[in-house]
Image: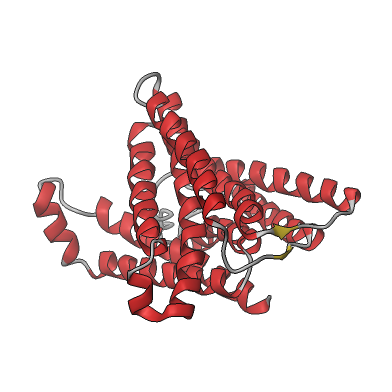
């Protein structure tokens, strides 16, 4: 359990570094750099390349966490990415961070800790039956397709919400495919993994999640897309963990009630954190000497 938590926290930190470094490099590019010239410019920027290294690290540590532990533990912990980003904004970029943002970050951490402690996630099995995989893929894939169709028209907020929800479902599917791929790799090696389906489903889910997330970020405000992406992903992952891997929680009604309330509080705090965190990467102004 301890290794699962540590690996998941390192993955969340790596994801936070990736978000901050690549965004910093992108907005720092000269306005004249567009298209392929922009790509070439970014490849020459150490900060942007550091972001890619962090992204790979986040993926590897998430894979290690999922292989070592439960989806219902790992995916909620990844929410702490937002907290790490806030800390990096203050420590690295020297930004002024509102007290409300720090309070929201604290609530996220406390509510997450209460949820994991009280819900008592346990059980699990290495893999699911083919029929269960097909039913889960049909349900989640179908829901994502309907959301994409709904996001093709309407107001920017509606389009953003639809694409973000679809992206969150794709990232949840990626998590279960990643767990299945790590189990396949441990059992059959690299050669055996390449002739079995989980690794290709993983690639498809990762590409879909990336495209849908970018569509959400392009369609409308970050204050709409970020909370949905961050909150719905672990919630959908928990559903899939029960559905496919037979993970389960405490049967105590009182504890379940507290767990549900704590998850809801965490979700609300994530929304508040997204709204109260600095909206750009500008450092705090230096006082005149």
Residue nearest the viewer, comparing 75 with 48? 75
Q: Residue at x 62, y 47 (%)?
A: 235
Its colouring scheme is secondary structure
The quadrant the N terminus occupies is: bottom right
In screen coordinates, is 252 left or right of 129?
A: right
In-front residue for pair 146/266: 146
The correct choice, above or below, for 3 with respect to 125 in the image is below
| Tag count | 0
Indicate the quadrant where residue 288 lies: bottom left
Name the residue located 46 percent from the left edge and 35 percent from the top edge.
142
Q: Is residue 260 above or below residue 251?
A: above
Tell me where residue 127 appears, x and y as whole percent. Answer: 57, 64
Residue furthest to the top: 154
Residue 115: percent from left, percent from top: 75, 56
Residue 115 located left or right of residue 40: right
Q: Where 200 falls versus 278 (above or below)?
A: below
Residue 135 x/y as whole percent:
54, 44
Residue at (57, 44) in percent of width and height: 232
Q: Position of residue 245 (x, y in %)?
A: 62, 60
Image quarter in which the C terminus is found: bottom left
- For the question of whether residue 61 can be seen, the reply is no
Q: Quadrant of residue 211?
A: top left
What residue lies at 45% left-to-right and 68% top-to-bottom? Answer: 181
- From where the camera sits, is residue 120 visible? yes
């Amino acid at each position: 359990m301890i290794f699962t938590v540590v690996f998941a926290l390192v993955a969340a930190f790596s994801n936070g570094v990736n978000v901050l470094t690549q965004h910093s490099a992108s907005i720092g590019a000269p306005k004249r750099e567009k298209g392929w010239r922009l790509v070439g410019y970014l490849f020459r920027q150490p900060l942007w390349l550091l972001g890619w290294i962090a992204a790979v690290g986040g993926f590897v540590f998430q894979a290690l966490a999922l292989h070592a532990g439960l989806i219902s533990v790992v995916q909620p912990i990844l929410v702490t990415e937002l907290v790490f980003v806030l800390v990096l904004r203050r420590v690295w970029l020297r930004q002024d961070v509102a007290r409300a943002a720090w309070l929201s970050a604290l609530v996220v951490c406390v509510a997450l800790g209460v949820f994991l402690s009280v819900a008592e996630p346990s059980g699990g099995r290495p893999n699911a039956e083919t029929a269960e995989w097909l039913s889960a893929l049909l349900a989640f894939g179908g829901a994502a397709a309907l959301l994409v169709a709904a996001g093709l028209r309407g107001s920017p907020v509606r389009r953003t919400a639809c694409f973000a929800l679809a992206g969150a479902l794709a990232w949840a599917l990626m998590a279960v495919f990643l767990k299945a791929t790590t189990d396949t790799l441990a059992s059959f090696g690299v050669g055996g993994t390449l002739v079995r389906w989980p690794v290709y489903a993983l690639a498809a889910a990762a590409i879909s999640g990336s495209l849908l997330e970018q569509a959400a970020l392009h369609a409308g405000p970050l204050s709409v897309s970020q909370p949905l992406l961050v909150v719905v992903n672990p919630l959908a992952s928990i559903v899939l963990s029960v559905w496919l891997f037979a993970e389960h929680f405490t049967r105590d009604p009182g504890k379940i009630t507290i767990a549900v309330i704590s998850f809801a509080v965490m979700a609300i705090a994530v929304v508040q954190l997204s709204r109260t965190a600095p909206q750009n990467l500008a450092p705090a102004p230096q006082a005149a000497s």
